[in-house]
Amino acid sequence: MVKKFTLKKEERLKRRKIIEQLFSEGRAVAAFPIRVQYKLVDQLLTVPLQAGFSVSSRNFKKAVDRNRIKRLMREAYRLQKAPLEQALQTKQQQLALFLIYTGKELPEFTVVKEKVEVVLKKLLQTVTAM
């Protein structure tokens, strides 16, 4: 079976209610310059894992720069989300997470990919421990 590395519309975190819960009740994991806010959700999602992406407009005034960083984070996440997704499916849990870029300079893809990998491994450890 060929594994498809996709990020479909259903896998994007869009619900305002869930995002508000995420930031008020959720926990955080960080590996500079990426911080992840996450929360286990009770049967509100259609897929086991939903993610949102954000870059501060305070640090990056130009929308072009913010969009590029979000694009890099989405790509790095898309390529590395499979182990976390499988762990959630086996435990029959649902996770909502929000990746936030906290750095002040434009990153390269290799840096973003490494940091997203570190953060997702930390999340995988916490999910398997629950």
Image (cartoon, grey):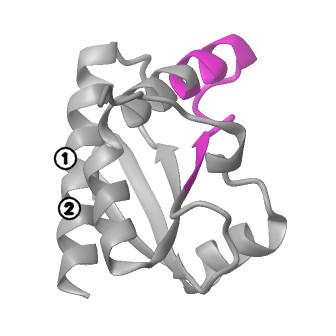
**Callout 2 environment at 10 Å: few (<14), some (14 to 19), or many (20+)?**
some
**Callout 1 environment at 10 Å: few (<14), some (14 to 19), or many (20+)?**
some
Location of residue 9 in the rendering, given as x and y in whole percent from the top left corner? 71, 39
Location of residue 77 in the rendering, given as x and y in whole percent from the top left corner? 40, 36
Q: Which residue is mark 2?
A: 122
The residue closer to the viewer here, 11 or 58, is: 11
Report the residue that reaches farthest toward the right.
Answer: 16
Label ID, residue 118: 1
Does the magenta segment cover residue 10? Answer: no
> Which residue shows up at 69% across the image and 48% down it?
10
> Which residue shows up at 33% across the image and 30% down it?
3
The residue closer to the viewer here, 122 or 61, is: 122
What is the span of residues highlighted in magenta in the rendered image? 50-70
93 to 31, vertically: above or below? below
Does the magenta segment cover residue 60? Answer: yes
CB-based contact (under 8 Å), mark 1 and mark 2 = yes
